[in-house]
């Protein structure tokens, strides 16, 4: 098991290194001048050059990359060009919203998807199965930003139950913060839940056709007992694959929803920083999101081996 985890961890480090190189080269090769953007179109060339030198934009690419990596190693992400404050502090402040939003969305996704997937598999080819699968097809086709607008019209404009946007803040209490994130979380979860429900149904149906399931039923176990005690564990590997990818997508895909609901999260910070050509903030935010995605995939790989020990044997 330790050798399996070590190999996966080395792969994680190599992937992070490759991602850092790609992110740095792509962002620093973008057309435009961050110093010119900050100074304005009417700024003199001498003033623009002076600001570029102050920001280190006149240094060679290799030096700037090495300086960025060395800073990340000690937690120094530099200072924002536009905000004039620490990038680490900006990101930490925005993560206090984005991570709870992603976690709440994932929790809603898992509850809806597993419930629907297990129910439809247990009632295969019956009315409930057809009805729920039809709903999931609609869910997959819904753009989450459009569904978010519908939720705002219903729960904010018509019913006045929840706010249409903004974030109350955690200082007002956990419940107030969660109320602010509920509509955005549902907007993000609907499409993901529809996809995961279909994957769960297919995985459970595949396992239900295995010989050991028929053996368990022949020994007198009820259908419910077989489903919960034997089928689900074996069906969870493909489900966990999709869950890991979906959580990574939720972490990285909140930009549109955060702008729809005017939430001061990481996605909105990236959007604003791109508009300001605040490359140091964009670079660190994108690297953080890439690191989160890569780390989630690593955790999923390890969980595979916990659920099914055959996986680590096959990969040694």
Image (tube, grey):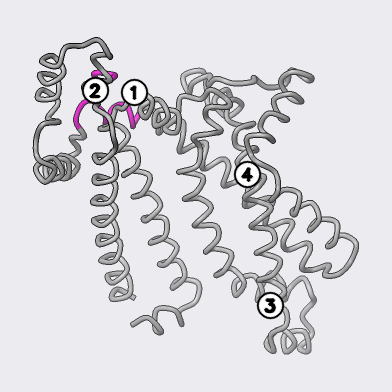
In the image shown, does 207 or 275 lie closer to the viewer? 275
Query: Reading the chain from its start, which is encountered first: label 2 or label 3?
Result: 2
Q: Are marks 2 and 3 in contact (CB under 8 Å)?
A: no
Q: Which mark is residue 84?
A: none
Mark 2, other Cα within 10 Å: few <14 / some 14–19 / many ≥20: many
Q: Is residue 92 left or right of residue 202?
A: left
Q: Quadrant of residue 41?
A: top left
Q: Quadrant of residue 123?
A: bottom right
Q: Nearer the viewer, mark 2 or mark 3?
A: 2
Q: Are marks 1 and 2 in contact (CB under 8 Å)?
A: yes
Residue shown at 85%/56% (left/top)?
A: 131
Could you tell me residue 19's position as x and y percent?
Answer: 29, 53
Secondary structure at badge 1 equals loop
Query: Reading the chain from its start, which is encountered first: label 3 or label 4?
Result: 4
Asked if 283 appears above or below 157 in the picture, the reply is below
Q: Which mark is residue 81?
A: 2
Secondary structure at badge 2 equals loop
Residue annotated with mark 4: 189
Q: Nearer the viewer, mark 2 or mark 4?
A: 2
**How far apart, in angstroms, are the residues tagged by discs 2 and 3?**
54 Å
Could you tell me residue 246's position as x and y percent?
Answer: 53, 53
In the image shown, does 224 or 267 lie closer to the viewer? 267
Which contiguous range is marked in magenta?
A: 78-92
């Amino acid at each position: 098991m330790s050798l399996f985890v070590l190999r996966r961890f080395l792969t994680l480090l190599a992937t992070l290194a490759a991602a850092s190189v790609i992110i740095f080269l792509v962002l620093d090769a973008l057309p435009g001048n961050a110093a010119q953007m900050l100074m304005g179109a009417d700024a003199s060339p001498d003033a623009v050059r002076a600001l570029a030198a102050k920001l280190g934009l006149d240094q060679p690419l290799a030096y700037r990359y090495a300086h960025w990596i060395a800073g990340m190693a000690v937690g120094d992400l530099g200072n924002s060009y536009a905000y004039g404050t620490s990038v680490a502090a900006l990101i930490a402040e925005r993560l206090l919203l984005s991570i709870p939003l992603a976690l709440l969305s994932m929790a809603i996704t898992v509850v809806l998807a597993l419930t629907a997937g297990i129910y439809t598999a247990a009632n295969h080819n019956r009315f409930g199965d057809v009805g729920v699968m039809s709903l999931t097809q609609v869910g997959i086709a819904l753009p989450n930003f459009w569904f978010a607008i519908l939720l705002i019209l219903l729960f904010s404009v018509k019913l006045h139950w929840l706010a249409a946007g903004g974030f109350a803040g955690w200082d007002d209490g956990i419940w107030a913060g969660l109320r602010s994130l509920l509509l955005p979380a549902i907007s993000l979860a609907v499409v993901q839940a529809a996809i995961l429900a279909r994957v769960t149904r297919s995985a459970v149906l595949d396992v239900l056709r295995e010989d050991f399931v028929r053996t368990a039923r022949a020994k007198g176990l009820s259908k419910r007992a077989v489903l919960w005690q034997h089928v689900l564990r074996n069906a969870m590997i493909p489900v966990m694959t999709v869950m890991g990818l979906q959580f990574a997508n939720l972490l990285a895909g909140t930009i549109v929803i955060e702008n729809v609901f005017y939430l001061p999260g990481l996605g909105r910070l990236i959007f604003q920083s791109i508009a300001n050509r605040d490359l140091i903030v964009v670079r660190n935010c994108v690297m953080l999101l890439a690191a989160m995605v890569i780390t989630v995939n690593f955790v999923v790989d390890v969980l595979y081996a916990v659920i099914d020990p055959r996986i680590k044997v096959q990969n040694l």
